[in-house]
Image (spheres, coloured by chain):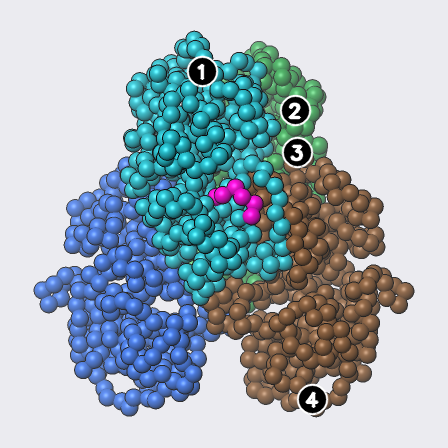
Chain colours: A blue, B green, C cyan, D brown
Amino acid sequence: MDKPFGEFKVQEIPVPEPKRGELLVRQVMCGVCGTDVHIYQGRLPDVKYPLVLGHEIIGTIEKLGEGVNRDHTGREVEEGDLIYVIPALRCRRCYFCLDLRQPNLCMNGTAYGFNPYPDEPPGFYGGYGEFIYMRHPNSEFLKMDAKPEAAVFLEPLTIGIHAVSRVDIHVGDVVVVQGAGAIGLSALIAAKEKGAFKTIVIGAPKSRLELAKEFGADLTIDIEEIEDPKERVEIVKSETRGGYGADVVIECTGFPSAVPEGIDMVRRGGFYAVAGHFTDAGPVMINPYSAFTRKHINLVGVWSSRLEDFIRGRPIIESGRYPIEKIVSHKLPLERCKDAMEAMIEGYRLDGKEVRKIVIQGGL
Amino acid sequence: MDKPFGEFKVQEIPVPEPKRGELLVRQVMCGVCGTDVHIYQGRLPDVKYPLVLGHEIIGTIEKLGEGVNRDHTGREVEEGDLIYVIPALRCRRCYFCLDLRQPNLCMNGTAYGFNPYPDEPPGFYGGYGEFIYMRHPNSEFLKMDAKPEAAVFLEPLTIGIHAVSRVDIHVGDVVVVQGAGAIGLSALIAAKEKGAFKTIVIGAPKSRLELAKEFGADLTIDIEEIEDPKERVEIVKSETRGGYGADVVIECTGFPSAVPEGIDMVRRGGFYAVAGHFTDAGPVMINPYSAFTRKHINLVGVWSSRLEDFIRGRPIIESGRYPIEKIVSHKLPLERCKDAMEAMIEGYRLDGKEVRKIVIQGGL
Amino acid sequence: MDKPFGEFKVQEIPVPEPKRGELLVRQVMCGVCGTDVHIYQGRLPDVKYPLVLGHEIIGTIEKLGEGVNRDHTGREVEEGDLIYVIPALRCRRCYFCLDLRQPNLCMNGTAYGFNPYPDEPPGFYGGYGEFIYMRHPNSEFLKMDAKPEAAVFLEPLTIGIHAVSRVDIHVGDVVVVQGAGAIGLSALIAAKEKGAFKTIVIGAPKSRLELAKEFGADLTIDIEEIEDPKERVEIVKSETRGGYGADVVIECTGFPSAVPEGIDMVRRGGFYAVAGHFTDAGPVMINPYSAFTRKHINLVGVWSSRLEDFIRGRPIIESGRYPIEKIVSHKLPLERCKDAMEAMIEGYRLDGKEVRKIVIQGGL
Amino acid sequence: MDKPFGEFKVQEIPVPEPKRGELLVRQVMCGVCGTDVHIYQGRLPDVKYPLVLGHEIIGTIEKLGEGVNRDHTGREVEEGDLIYVIPALRCRRCYFCLDLRQPNLCMNGTAYGFNPYPDEPPGFYGGYGEFIYMRHPNSEFLKMDAKPEAAVFLEPLTIGIHAVSRVDIHVGDVVVVQGAGAIGLSALIAAKEKGAFKTIVIGAPKSRLELAKEFGADLTIDIEEIEDPKERVEIVKSETRGGYGADVVIECTGFPSAVPEGIDMVRRGGFYAVAGHFTDAGPVMINPYSAFTRKHINLVGVWSSRLEDFIRGRPIIESGRYPIEKIVSHKLPLERCKDAMEAMIEGYRLDGKEVRKIVIQGGL
């Protein structure tokens, strides 16, 4: 991609030979993320153009650099194995990485798919391509024993896992997820795995809510049917102990207006996790008296995810507990990256089918 | 007080004889709280008029009911002893009191000074009077070994203690307090007692900030001198490790505009406690991206306080570590309750002196 | 029961009429708990004889006292409804109840089944009888919509729920339960509800371990087959990430020797909950270097349970997610209380069947 | 040092030239730690001989390698500046470093003073020498603005800071420290900085307890005067709210027998941190019923410390709040390393003076 709202060019460049500690990966699939769209739109000021997009990458090992024979957790690997490319490249030296032990807030972090080598011409450093060259010394990967269509969801799943690690979910608790997109489903899975007793998903369209039910949501609320936020709040409350509200609400929409609505759904003393605002969509009016002090709220932001979230997510995908492969709705070749961007921006449908998760397939 | 913005009438009524388990207290002082002013203005819809205001009550035991010979923590008491009347009367039966163990969120709570017996004519159930009749079965009191001018501050101090119990303060951390009023000083004391390494108080006027320094604030920022919130944010940041922002910020102003400013002062991954919004002062614009998700914030509301906060506050006052008695600026007789209200509403001065904490003295 | 190792006498006494706020309950079943056996053996020095044993009580409402028309959580009740008698009677006034908000550590607590009125002749204050007279002002009960054989397990289930509330279980974690008795199964259910990814139960005999598998244990270790503790530790480690040990181990055996073995199973930095030592079974050798400091352990004791644990447990039983009713192995009439005691002391079998949970049926 | 109980040889070897990213430090002082003595005694099986001991190192920058111009927190440095050598060298790649974010449990960690290059002849990789060559890529250092006699205490101080980060200290809490040696004083300082309201130090000899008082201990208990542990427990209890026991006890002795005594001092539901058992001193009898389950204890082990603990400790030393420089009792030249070892093993005195902290001065 050459510039905001620019063109995706498919180029042939020489495939590098991985050196000691490096890895060359043949892409199998790369998920299209809302953040990719934000980069396409030029809304992430720190990302430099041109670049190769894509950070939800599953591939097979094409060539192992010298000394590389195990994945991050010690599983033995050989050429041909399916692996997940952990995109984030933390510095492991800064105040946040080392001292506060919050590597998700790394001061010097970059990632595959975010142009980690901005001073060079674009290379194999993103998932929208045939190969990924894992050249950075802090690169990590995980061998996966799952279908690629399910495995590709690992990175989105880490956001939900990170979110639930920031709230208390006690035995018997009711958890609400605002949003039925990829992050919403990720939060739903994570909430169930963290012990939510009852889960409620709020979103649209109907088909996504049906998918949420397949994933185990106890109740779904269709915002196209129940258009009044107050009514939605009342429905949530009526499903909770004493009608006091949900113990935990996780925001996965990216819409500022979802925030005050979600806070209204939380019981006094409960948790609200704002996990969907990866980019600036503007401010919203919040009343500090009713939303914060009187609510005695615990509101947490959830920025990015951590290596541990990948480790924790892998066995969930490998277990086959959830029909995760159904999230992939479209498989597009490299030539159709721009179609993917526009489908994500404009609406729910592409090629006559509703959009859930589009994946780009780099293979020729 | 008969109605919102009404009159304070001083009436003589028969002094009750305390029955088994009850107590009659001769008022020594009662602090005037911002919440009293909100009741005076009719801004607390649940409070019924007429009533006797006042919930920051220090007094001497006038008459012990049968069976009462120790305070809540087991200190022996006799008539004449100085005690603090714990105002809150929790039900100890509801979901919040018993099941969630959050009695500050009691569904059926009332308090001395908030008209606990709304179906009866006003009696000795508030601090703006000569006596307090502790008749409720859930009444508790604490014997205090301190000057009344210091002891009267126990209830406000509990708000700060409660606030710091809701955040993490690690060794070496920087804590900012927004507000230099009674709650601001309470939060300052509590932050120091909870282990803040460096404390910064932001507020006005200058004389209050000087008092904050006497209480041990390492730095004060005068909002009348530094009028630009952005500049104040920069000053705070420059005082923190790496310039990243404060580890903890505690809001004690009640002004909605203080909230986004305070969030800007918090480092990523830090804590923001909203402790000053006891009444509805309207909404404010907040950006969920920068203030919540990207900030990876921990934002907590702080509603009321708990018995344990009184137990924890008493030894601090008794230790004499802080010149708490200097907070009391005015001692007014019962007849001047309305003057107190108006001074709190209109400004900083009364009787030619700056207002810090006004106390009402019920004695004739 | 008249004294340690004494007789259980079935007596007829007048059935009381419940007064305002009280309740008369017709017993349906009362579980026999190991603690009952300890009382039978005279090992709980605070309990006075004679008394009526039994604190795992499910019954129907025989007579509602005036003003009683809802259960503790607000469900409407009428005569004939099935309810659980919450046995614990906390004072709601002491330092632990009110100030530390740890009512399970109440200084003045008693309970139905533990002789709450020691100065009176035994009355209907325990579960081994035809009626229970809920006379204490702090009595609480819960309406239950479940088979009595499952519902009777609510009190034991609260121990497991309390235990998991004291440890961190993250998404993907491995939890080991030492013990396959009632408390072991309780901890297993609770661990699964709190989000354990993999659960391992260690105990005997084989039939109990088979029941644990029906409850969802991923692996069981039979101590009669694998007799060497070191070997058991190695099996557990081999089932964990990197072979480092379990993230959480919950002790539910009451045997001191289980403690060092269980600590060996915990990974460095993990959690060990000692939930099975309700009575003194003697000391054990522990090495503070390897078990505590070098292990960087988080070891928590779990004493009794809290009202919230009952609230959290009820929907689990009502959901029918687990075949809880299979835990009841024997239903004995009042006349056979002593047989129950001896079967619990001597071994695994009674009336030719293996003992899981014995219940006493008070009905004539 | 050539082998357990062997000789310390002072050798001259060529001083290396620091390469890019490296540092050469001229030793100013190196504290003698109990762990050094354990290595001298051959009690740390992982450490290979021969080696240069010493990991509490303060020195001046002799030569900056290319690209090194700031310390770990960004303070600018130049040759001649006083710095602390952070001894621990974590791998920053393993499951504990990266995934669990517990670098103190690093699987591949080593440290200056523990022979980080065991396959080479001893070099400048420990503090008992004239220079320290910071060659490892994960080396970190901190510029310090304090007297060397105070600054040298930073590493011991991190143990106390780490310990208090593992317990809850609420406003008003009583904290007991078992042990008045270097780690005991470290825990005392940390407890005060974390907000302990009252601190009690238990140990001997009298002169160390007097030093503890200078550091702000509210009470000291001399174990040479009060020889009966039960009596010591009673004294502690009598100093706590309601006589229930200390909220937090921190073990800093290394003696197994201190553990059950310390647990007896904790109130039910309180914290016990085992911070003093860095080496195996054998097991001790503990009763799981009274010490764990019934006590409802929170017992935490404290292994090593983390970079953040150094960051948090530096400003405490720089503030001059505590007379830390008084801890250094002896300054010995390199030739007397063995005297230091034997004084630490045999008793309290060396050169006619009581031993607190011995430092080795490498300068010629």
Query: Label 4's element?
Result: loop
Give the mark toward the camera: 4 or 1: 1
Observer-nearest residue: C228 or B183?
Answer: C228
Instruction: Respond whether the residues carrying marks 3 and 2 are from the same subunit.
Output: no
Give the mark toward the camera: 1 or 2: 1
Q: Amino acid at mark 1?
A: Val
Observer-nearest residue: B112 or A312?
Answer: A312
Span shown in magenta: C252-257
Residue C232 shows which numbered tag?
none
Residue pointed to by mark 2:
B70
Instruction: Respond whether the residues carrying marks 4 and 1 are from the same subunit.
Output: no
**In the rendered structure, are the residues bearing label 1 and label 2 in contact, judged by CB atoms less than 8 Å apart?**
no
Residue D15 shows which numbered tag?
4
- Return the x and y of residue B351 as percentages of the image width and height: 62, 35
Observer-nearest residue: D77 or D294?
Answer: D294
**In the rendered structure, are the residues bearing label 3 and label 1 in contact, judged by CB atoms less than 8 Å apart?**
no
Between the C-alphas of marks 3 and 4, the distance is 62 Å
Give the mark toward the camera: 3 or 1: 1
Decide which of tag 3 and tag 4 comes sooner along the chain: 4
Between the C-alphas of marks 3 and 1, the distance is 43 Å
Which image quadrant is residue B171 in?
Answer: bottom right
Between the C-alphas of marks 4 and 2, the distance is 73 Å
Residue pointed to by mark 3:
D242
